[in-house]
Amino acid sequence: MKKITFIFVFLFSILAMSQNPYVTITVAQDGSGQFTSIQKAINSLRDLGPGEALIKIKSGVYKEKVVIPSSKHQITLEGEDKETTIITNDDYSGKLNPTTNEKLTTFDSYTVLVVGDDIKISNITIQNTWCNKGQAVSLHVEGDRFVMRDSKLLGCQDTLYTAKDNSRQYYENCYIEGTTDFIFGQATAVFKNCEIRSLSDSYITASATSPQNEFGFVFFDCHLTAKEGVSKVFLGRPWRPFAKTVFINTTMENHILPEGWNPWKGDKMFPEKEKTAFYAEFGSKGKGANPSKRVAWSHQLSKKEIKKYTIENIFKKSTSWNPSK
C-alpha cells in the first residue's frame, strides 16, 4: 500500500511540475519587478529551458523591439491589462538602421519577433505606430504552436506577419487592425472570435500558403469592422499562387465589397493567381455577406466540405495540436 501511495504522489508531482512554470518573472517600469525591460527578462531565461517560463508584465508603455529567439521556447508573456500593457515601436521598411547603416525591410520592421516555439501572449497590446507610406509590422511570428489571446495588434500596412510554412498560429478574442494586407504570410493560422478592423479602403489578408499545406488562414466567428468612412475593402488577395483563406460564420459589415476577393493583377512573377488560390466562405453574416455576388473563382463551402474545418484537423501535421482545448 505504501508503495502504491508513493507512486501516486510521485506521478502527481510530475504532473504538477508539467503544468506550472518553472520560473516566474515580473517586468515593471516602476522597478517593483525583477526587470524594467521585457527584452532583458527574456534574455535572462535559460536557453531551451526545462518547462514553461512565465513573464508577467505590469501596465506601462514599453518602447522596445522585442525578440524571442529560437533558443527560447515555452514562454508566456502575460500582461496586466491589454488596454494598459503596451509594447510599441515605429520601425518601417526603408527606415535607416543606425547600427548597420542599412535600410530596414518589411521583415525586420517588427515591434515583436517570435522565433521560438510554444510561445503564448495574453492581455497585451503590440503596436507599430508608423502609419505613413510603407510596411510596418507589429507582430512577426515564425515559431510553431504560437498562441495569442485577449490581445490587440495595432498598426497600418502589414500589421501581422504570420511567417514560415511550418508555423501553426492561433489567435483568440483578439483585436487586429490595419490598412493594407494587414494579416499576411505563409503560416497556417486560425483566428477565433476576433475583431478585424480595416482602417482604409484596401485588403484584409494576403496569404502565401505553400502548395503542400492544406490550410492557410481560417477565421471562425469573427467580426469584420471598419473605421468611419471606409467602404471598399476586399477580404483578401493572394500574395502567392496557392494562397488559402476561409471565413466561417463571420459577421461582415457593409465595408466589404460584394465581389469579396481580389486576384492581385499586375504581379509579373505570379500572374493569374486566382486559378490556383483557394478563397472560401461558410455562413457569412451581415451587410457585407453577398455570396451570390462573390467573384466566380471563390467558393461557398457546403455542409459536407465544412466538416474538415475543425481546429484539430487544421493544425494536424507531423504532430497534433489543439490550442482551443
Image (cartoon, grey):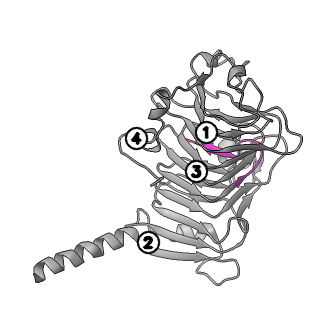
User: Which residue in the protein does label 1 denote?
Assistant: 249
| The C terminus, quarter of image | bottom left
* Residue 233 position within the rendered picture, expressed as x and y whole percent measured from the top left: 78, 33
Relative to 27, say whether 250 is above or below: above
Q: Which residues are magenta?
A: 153-163
Query: On the rendered structure, is 171 left or right of 211?
Result: right
Q: Nearer the viewer, mark 3 or mark 1?
A: 1
Residue 298 colored in magenta in the image: no
Q: Earlier in the sequence, mark 3 or mark 4?
A: 3
- Residue 3 or residue 292, whichever sits in front: 292
User: Which residue in the protein does label 2 denote?
Assistant: 21
User: Which residue in the protein does label 3 denote?
Assistant: 171
Disc 4 on helix, strand or loop?
A: loop
Query: On the rendered structure, is 319 left or right of 168?
Result: left
Name the residue at 46% across, 56% down: 118
- Amino acid type, callout 3: Tyr
Question: Gap in Å between the C-alphas at discs 1 and 4?
Answer: 22 Å
Q: Earlier in the sequence, mark 4 or mark 2?
A: 2
Q: Splitting the image into 4 quarters, where does residue 273 fall?
A: top right
Question: Gap in Å between the C-alphas at discs 4 and 2?
Answer: 26 Å
C-beta proximity under 8 Å, tags 2 and 1? no
Name the residue at 81% across, 43% down: 199
Question: Gap in Å between the C-alphas at discs 2 and 1?
Answer: 36 Å
* Residue 237 position within the rendered picture, expressed as x and y whole percent measured from the top left: 68, 28
Direction right: furthest residue: 229
Relative to 11, say whether 87 is above or below: above
- Amino acid type, callout 4: Lys
Q: Nearer the viewer, mark 2 or mark 1?
A: 1
